[in-house]
């Protein structure tokens, strides 16, 4: 049988059926497409949700423009990898809605529990853990004065993007160690009577002492088989928790803010240092001390990154002044002995000291102690190709002789974010 | 997201019949969905209501939970939402015997939702559909506002900042506001408030009016007397009717919570362009009211569901062959932890304890006033009214009243039976460690500790005396806990956006220990050791100040 051709009346009938079907929905409180709305919260591709973070952060920036405080913090969750250092870390956005609430810190925290212990008995203890196991929010969570922490927060966002495979190069052990919250387990404590490994020397000493006191040991005639052994004389080594001490690093950020830096060079240098700073905040957090130095013909120290980042342009250029100040700080405060020292310098390559007569000796001096000096040169549009600093550094031959000194130059106008990332990888390369 | 299979649904229906036999009451219709873990993470950000309005905080939570799920993959077995029909979500791939147990647990929740009086307000409608309608309203507003659509979010944000101080308990009262009829109200107002103010010292006139009323009462009878009496007054007091109307209006709005007050009186809404904000605020407020009862029936709700899944599943023959699996799983759920509070365990044990007491008639005078320990232990009148008792409690109590239900002695017995205690921590600074020690094994202390954990939301009300021309004044009610002052500037900032005037004042309490070196521990006894200070926080034209005030 061949297929019957659909007549016009058939079509009309079909349409009517469809209309009736729709009408059922329009009569009830639900609409025809409600089912789809219910379902739309579940994007079919789970990775769609991944891009959302950037969107949310963009929205947060918009808030600031509208006069509302920023609300999204980027925190990290750490899952300890069993001491082997394979901790997995993921970055999560976090926000807390402000509401009227009671002050929890007011009360001495009481917790419920169950067990047989008597009143006053200790049932357990744990180390004070600053990071916290669950949601270790980043430290700058103060919400009172939104403006202050703006850059810190942004630094953190950026750090997470960059820091996958970066670390400070040439980090070495220094004299002074600093308390860290990490700990390890070692066989260092001793315990009488029971434990994991018998401490033979201590045990023997105790037994001999006991037997001398009992008068069973005579120097002329020593018979170990006759010794009386008190079970408590046995001394064992036991596993115990030891705190780890770590070396810290001091990082100097140097920025040229002379008049020639106006415009693109400043933007580029700031961007580079911002990202560097972000990585350090993200990776090392408490372990790194950052110092900020601005220079034109004279150098001065900025109190924090915010000031460093936002300082406006002035005066001429004397690169040596910045290194001089760094050398002075290191010497006065005796930093070399206790810290790993890193110097990152951002400039447009312009220097009034054209031959580097003053700058080269200072840089050489800094190289004696620094683990890395990274110089970023963002060339100005009007500078003709190679700049002064590039020339005198090349002439001095310092770049070839020292692995610690790295320099890269590029045109400020042609910089992309990708280039900056590569640049940072380069100046941090081991 | 899809409905459970026919086979599993059959198991559910079977469970319903058995649960009903035991006395649980719930609607015939329920909906069960299987959802994947990924869906679960995005749903939990929306309080498990898929049709809840869109708001970026939900997106943040969603991103957060879906990312942290990678590190810590764990999901609840079930989640029930309080709608009609009741809807519950399940993980897929549960074995059948486990489903039986989970279904009993879910039925316990549904029974609780549909019978506890604190949920009464949520019984009337299908919240899922209401939320959908709200979602559409907000979506439409965003479309209408176009470029300024993000201001919808700001209004939501400001309104949500106040959604934990809504007048939930008043909303339970069906006669709240002006609808409440008070006998002889007009007359009372006339003689007690209106006349003294109007006449000052002319007492003769009052006497004369009273006589007139009494005579009329004799002549016309109680039905018509009021009307005739007040008609006769129009000549003497022409302004009375108007004043009475004002009084009624004032009375009806006297108990408004902060959001309601803003809706009715905010200077913002004098501008018709801002009217759309009212819709948003209303939606936020209604949503909050819907979720409110779940906040303070956590222990009861979980306890009740656990109580019933234990009881029903052990009676069920489908447990055969899975007794060990069940015991293992159940003990994990019900375990009273060495440290911490398990609402499932605590609630369930308390229900069992009360049932046992009622079975033995121990709520009677004889038992309660018996001091002899041996007598108390033996006491049993075999009345067997246990189930009636706990069904009654399930209907009428919330967490605080539930915990407080037992007398002091009985609660001590309860704590002894389950070895409950109060643990506190102190910090050993030398060794950089937190040390946990047993602080008390007294029942009352344990009860107080649970109370403190339950007391979360402060009470903030509008201070009507001080609210005037562009100034909005709020009061904190004293509950022996100080307000967290760290986010008050932000809160006042939000309020200033909703209020429209330039000044917001908040009067809060601060508790300061009398002797500074003493660690502040607040409880019933130690409240005396604290000075209560009233603080006035003020937000005026973008500037925040706070100061101590006396005698407010």
Image (cartoon, coloured by chain):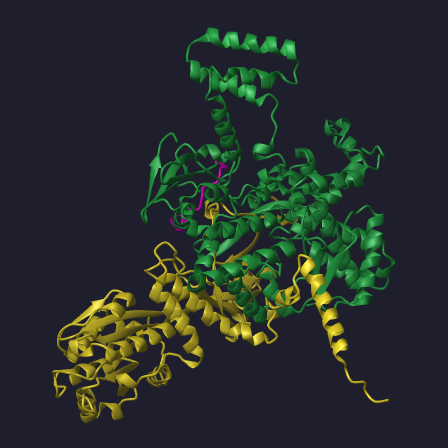
Chain colours: A yellow, B green
Task: From the viewer's side, name the closer residue of A156 and A226.
Answer: A156
User: In this figure, what is the number of numbered marks?
Assistant: 0
Rendered position, B228 above or below A242: above
Task: From the viewer's side, name the closer residue of B45 and B263.
Answer: B263
Task: Using the rendered image of the protein, determine whether residue A229 is visible from the camera's viewpoint.
Answer: no
Rendered position, A76 above or below A401: above
Q: Residue furthest front?
A: A8
Q: Residue A288 at x, y = what percent?
A: 35, 70
Q: Residue at x 58, y 38 (%)?
A: B170
Q: Residue at x 77, y 49 (%)?
A: B26
Q: Residue at x 52, y 73 (%)?
A: A50
Which region is colored magenta?
A: B478-490
In the picture, residue B332 is in which quadrant? bottom right
Q: Residue B216 at x, y = what percent?
A: 60, 11
Question: Looking at the figure, which quarter contains the C terminus of chain A?
Answer: bottom left
Task: From the viewer's side, name the closer residue of A12 and B514.
Answer: A12
Q: Left of B279 or right of it: where is B352?
A: right
Q: Residue B511 at x, y = what percent?
A: 43, 38
Rendered position, A145 above or below B188: below
Please say whether residue A206 is one of the residues in the magenta stretch. Answer: no
Q: Left of B538 or right of it: where is B338?
A: right
Please say whether residue B480 is one of the residues in the magenta stretch. Answer: yes
Q: Residue B385 at x, y = what percent?
A: 81, 37
Rendered position, B458 above or below B222: below
Which secondary structure class fits the magenta region best? loop
Question: Looking at the figure, which quarter contains the N terminus of chain A?
Answer: bottom right
Q: Left of B548 or right of it: where is B435?
A: right
Task: Using the rendered image of the protein, determine whether residue B136 is visible from the camera's viewpoint.
Answer: yes
In the picture, residue A414 is in which quadrant? bottom left
């Amino acid at each position: 049988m061949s297929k019957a051709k659909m007549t016009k009346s058939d079509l009309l009938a079909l349409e009517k059926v469809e209309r009736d079907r729709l009408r059922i929905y329009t009569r009830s409180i639900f609409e025809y497409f409600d089912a789809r709305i219910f379902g739309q919260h579940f994007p079919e591709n789970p990775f769609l949700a991944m891009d959302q973070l950037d969107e949310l952060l963009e929205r947060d920036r918009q808030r600031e423009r509208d006069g509302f405080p920023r609300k999204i913090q980027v925190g990290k969750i750490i899952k300890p990898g069993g001491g082997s250092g394979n901790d997995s870390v993921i970055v999560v956005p976090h926000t807390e809605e402000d509401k009227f609430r009671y002050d929890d810190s007011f009360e001495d925290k009481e917790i419920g529990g169950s067990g047989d212990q008597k009143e006053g008995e200790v049932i357990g203890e744990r180390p004070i853990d600053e990071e916290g196991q669950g949601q270790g929010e980043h430290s700058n969570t103060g919400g009172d004065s939104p403006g202050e922490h703006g850059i810190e927060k942004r630094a953190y966002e950026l750090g997470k993007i960059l820091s996958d495979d970066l670390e400070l190069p040439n980090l070495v052990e220094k004299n002074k160690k600093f308390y860290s919250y990490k700990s390890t387990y070692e066989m260092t404590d001793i315990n009488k009577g029971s434990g994991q490994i018998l401490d033979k020397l201590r045990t023997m000493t105790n037994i001999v002492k006991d037997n001398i006191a009992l008068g069973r040991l005579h120097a002329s005639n020593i018979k170990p088989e006759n010794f009386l052994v008190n079970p408590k004389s046995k001394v064992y080594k036991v596993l115990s928790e030891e705190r780890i001490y770590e070396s810290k690093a001091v990082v100097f950020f140097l920025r040229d803010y002379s008049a020639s830096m106006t415009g693109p060079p400043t933007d580029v240098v700031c961007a580079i240092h911002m990202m560097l700073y972000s990585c350090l905040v993200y990776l090392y957090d408490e372990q790194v001390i950052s110092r900020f130095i601005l220079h034109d013909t004279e150098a001065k120290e900025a109190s924090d990154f915010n000031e460093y980042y936002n300082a406006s342009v002035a005066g001429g250029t004397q690169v040596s002044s910045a290194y001089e100040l760094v050398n002075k700080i290191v010497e006065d405060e005796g930093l070399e002995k206790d810290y790993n020292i890193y110097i990152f310098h951002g400039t447009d390559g312009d220097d009034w000291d054209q031959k580097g007569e003053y700058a080269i000796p200072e840089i050489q001096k800094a190289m004696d102690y620094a683990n890395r000096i990274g110089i970023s040169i963002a060339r100005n549009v009007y500078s003709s190709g190679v700049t002064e600093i590039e020339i005198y550094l090349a002439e001095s031959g310092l770049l070839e002789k020292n692995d610690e000194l790295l320099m890269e130059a590029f045109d400020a106008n042609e910089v992309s974010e990708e280039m900056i990332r590569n640049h940072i990888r380069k100046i941090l390369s081991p | 997201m899809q409905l459970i299979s026919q086979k599993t649904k059959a198991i559910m229906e079977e469970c319903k019949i058995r649960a009903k036999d035991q006395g649980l009451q719930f609607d015939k219709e329920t909906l069960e969905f299987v959802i994947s873990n990924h869906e679960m993470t995005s749903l939990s950000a929306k309080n498990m209501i898929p049709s809840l309005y869109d708001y970026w905080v939900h997106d943040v939570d969603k991103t957060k939970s879906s990312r942290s799920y990678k590190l810590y993959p764990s999901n609840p077995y079930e989640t029930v939402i309080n709608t009609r029909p009741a809807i519950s979500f399940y993980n897929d791939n549960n074995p059948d015997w486990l489903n039986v147990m989970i279904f009993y647990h879910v039925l316990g929740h549904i029974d609780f939702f549909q019978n506890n009086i604190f949920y009464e307000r949520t019984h009337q409608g299908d919240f899922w559909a209401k939320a959908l309608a709200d979602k559409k309203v907000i979506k439409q507003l965003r479309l209408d506002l176009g470029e300024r659509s993000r201001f919808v979010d700001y209004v939501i944000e400001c309104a949500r900042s106040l959604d934990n101080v809504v007048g939930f308990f008043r909303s339970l009262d069906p006669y709240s506001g002006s609808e409440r009829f008070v006998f002889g109200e007009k007359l009372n107002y006339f003689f007690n408030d209106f006349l003294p103010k109007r006449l000052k010292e002319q007492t003769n006139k009052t006497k004369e009016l009273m006589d007139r009323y009494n005579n009329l009462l004799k002549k016309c009878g109680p039905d018509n007397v009021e009307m005739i009496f007040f008609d006769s007054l129009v000549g003497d007091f022409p302004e009375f009717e108007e004043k009475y109307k004002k009084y009624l209006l004032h009375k009806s709005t006297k108990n408004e919570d902060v959001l309601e007050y803003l809706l009715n009186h905010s200077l913002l809404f004098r501008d018709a362009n801002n009217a759309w904000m009212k819709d948003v605020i209303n939606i936020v407020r209604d949503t909050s009211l819907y979720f409110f009862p779940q906040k303070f029936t956590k222990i009861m709700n979980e306890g009740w569901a656990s109580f019933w899944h234990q009881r029903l599943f052990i009676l069920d023959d489908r447990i055969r062959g899975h007794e060990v699996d069940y015991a293992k799983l159940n003990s994990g759920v019900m375990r009273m932890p060495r440290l911490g509070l398990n609402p499932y365990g605590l609630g369930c044990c308390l229900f069992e304890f009360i049932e046992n007491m009622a079975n033995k008639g121990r709520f009677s005078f004889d038992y309660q006033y018996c001091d002899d320990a041996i007598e108390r232990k033996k006491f049993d009148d075999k009345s067997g009214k246990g189930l009636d008792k706990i069904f009654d409690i399930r209907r009428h109590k919330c967490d605080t009243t539930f915990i407080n239900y037992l007398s002091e002695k009985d609660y001590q017995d309860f704590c002894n039976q389950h070895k409950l205690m109060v643990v506190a921590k102190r910090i050993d600074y030398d060794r950089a460690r937190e040390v946990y020690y047993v602080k008390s094994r007294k029942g009352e202390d344990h009860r107080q500790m649970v109370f403190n954990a339950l007391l979360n939301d402060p009470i903030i009300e509008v201070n009507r005396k001080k609210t005037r021309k562009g100034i909005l004044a709020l009061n904190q009610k004293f509950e022996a806990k100080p307000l967290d002052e760290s986010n008050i500037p932000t809160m006042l900032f939000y309020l200033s956006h909703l209020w429209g005037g330039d000044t917001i004042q908040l009067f809060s309490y601060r508790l300061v220990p009398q002797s500074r070196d003493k660690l502040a521990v607040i409880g019933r006894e130690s409240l005396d050791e604290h000075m209560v200070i009233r603080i006035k926080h003020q937000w005026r034209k973008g500037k925040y100040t706070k100061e101590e005030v006396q005698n407010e």
